[in-house]
Amino acid sequence: MAHARSDFDLSPEAVADIDLAVPPRPAAVLVPIVMRETLTVLLTERSAHLPSHAGQIAFPGGKLEPHDAGPLGAALRETEEEIGLARSHISPVGYLDNYRTGTGFHIVPVVGLVEPTFELDVDTSEVASVFEVPLSFLMSPLNHQHHQREWRGRVRTYYAMPFGERYIWGATAGMLKNLHDRVFGA
């Protein structure tokens, strides 16, 4: 049974630091699984100058707009805007648990299978780079680490999946952990 996930799963005491009276901003991301001989997940590194989550590893996605056809429409639109991945190369297959971030977003993760023949047209004002990580690496419990960092005056524990020089952490790692739990019934 699906339930909401959050940045606070490993640090529930940190919930006290957010204003629960402010409604979270709805957002959606695409969890793009590229159908290569060895399955991969397509990730982005956000541009360093962005006002929020600058330089972080993320799925393509963003805020829901009034004209979007729900979270799926938003995830596909944002993916096309950010990295130029055409909708025609994506087959949506389902949703992961909703995810609440400490920065005030309520994210709906959409899982999509991506044909490997795609071409990208990256919007460099939003995305510094695009790269792929083997799905087997991301699904191995050996790579599901718990790291800590001070945030708003508290030490917070979060999921991390370091991959070479790429530091996958926070909401992105939390959603990948949710994918693992869904696939393997954990």
Image: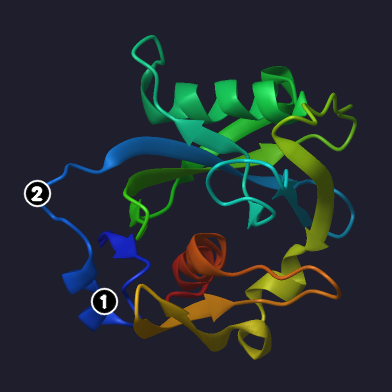
Task: Please give the residue where the numbered disc 1 appears in the rendered image.
Answer: 14
Please give the name of the residue rendered at 79% of the width and 68% of the height, measured from the top-left corner: 166
The percent position of residue 115, horizontal first and vertical second, equals 80, 34
Question: Can residue 3 be seen here?
Answer: yes
Local SS, label 1: helix
Say what amino acid the circle numbered 2 marks: Ala
Figure quadrant of the C terminus: bottom left
- Could you say which is closer to the camera, residue 86 or residue 166? 166
Q: Is residue 180 above or below residue 37?
A: below
Q: Is residue 41 above or below residue 65?
A: below
The residue carrying pointer 1 sits among few (fewer than 14), some (14 to 19) or many (20 or more) residues within 10 Å by Cα, namely some
The residue carrying pointer 2 sits among few (fewer than 14), some (14 to 19) or many (20 or more) residues within 10 Å by Cα, namely few
The percent position of residue 105, horizontal first and vertical second, equals 35, 46
- Could you say which is closer to the camera, residue 92 or residue 83? 83
Q: Image quadrant of residue 61?
A: top right
Q: Is residue 56 above or below residue 46?
A: below
Give whichever of discs 1 and 2 has the lower sequence position: 1
The percent position of residue 29, horizontal first and vertical second, equals 52, 40
Question: Can residue 186 be seen here?
Answer: no
Spot the residue most to the top. Answer: 67
Task: Please give the residue where the numbered disc 2 appears in the rendered image.
Answer: 21
Q: Which mark is residue 131?
A: none
The percent position of residue 48, horizontal first and vertical second, equals 72, 48
